[in-house]
Image (spheres, grey):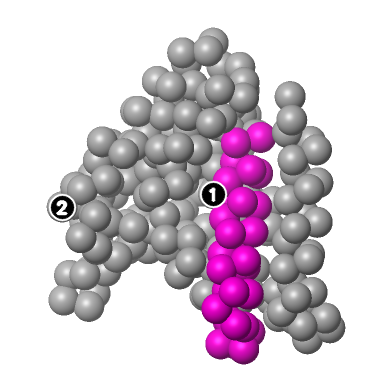
Amino acid sequence: MMKRLFASFCALMMLVSSSAFATSDSPVETIRDGARQVLDLLKQDNGKNTRQIRQQVEAVAVPQFDFQRMTALAVGRGWRQATPEQQQQLSQEFQTLLVRIYTSTMTRYKGTQVDVKPNPILASNGREATVKSEVTLPNSSDKKPVSIDYTLYKTSQGWKIYNVSVEGASLVTVYRNQFNDEINKNGVDGLIKMLKDKNAGVTAKGNA
């Protein structure tokens, strides 16, 4: 399940990596229109995952997410136990982990086919939205679409994504189980160390 969530998060990042649509009034258009932008970016370098392309995609993708909110949800109860400094470290390391996993593997998903559904589910007087989609990942053996739901909330800077669910499995919930186990064993500092170690491993693999 974790591997599939990572793959779908890569597809998600590709969908929303467009600063040009950051202030869209429509959560559906925020998701839908970004896909064309980053796919064009990947094609500029003939599909090669170069450092320059990784940096360009990261620069436009990161502002579309509320990584602090994602981290708080993923950490759960441990977030309230953490000091402000620890919360900052957790948010930065979790953001780094997700972004580096994506940028080290993103060219595998340049052929992704996406069907974004037109009618989002609204909540909180229209300030939150769930956008449903079906994503067909490249090189999938059965070509069966994967159901992916994106949860966003509206800010003065536009819609921000703070969770993704794949076939009903929430990204932050899957991480919460892992994070809670680490906090129970080694405390908040132990979780920070675990994330740093993971990031070091991802960096070593993706330094081409």
C-alpha distance separating marks 2 and 1: 23 Å
Q: Which residue is mark 2?
A: 25
Residue 4 on image: x %, y % = 64, 51
Q: Depth-wise, is mark 2 or mark 1 nearer the camera?
A: 2
Amino acid at the residue labelled 1:
Phe
Q: Secondary structure at mark 1?
A: helix
Q: Which residue shows up at 77% across the image and 54% down it?
A: 198
Q: Nearer the viewer, residue 32 or 200?
A: 200
Q: Which residues are magenta?
A: 76-104
Q: Nearer the viewer, residue 31 or 138?
A: 31
Question: Which of the two labelled residues, at mark 2 and mark 1, occupies the earlier sequence position?
Answer: 1
Q: Which residue is mark 1?
A: 9
Amino acid at the residue labelled 2:
Asp
Please indicate whether residue 112 sits to the left or right of residue 63 in the image: right
Q: Is residue 69 in the magenta section?
A: no
Q: Give neighbour class at mark 1: few <14, some 14-19, many 20+ (Cα, 10 Å).
A: many
Q: Which residue shows up at 34% across the image and 37% down it?
A: 18
Q: Which residue shows up at 56% across the image and 87% down it?
A: 80
Q: Give neighbour class at mark 2: few <14, some 14-19, many 20+ (Cα, 10 Å).
A: few
Q: Nearer the viewer, residue 34 or 155?
A: 155
Q: Quick check: 168 above or below 33? A: below
Specify the principal SS of the magenta part.
helix
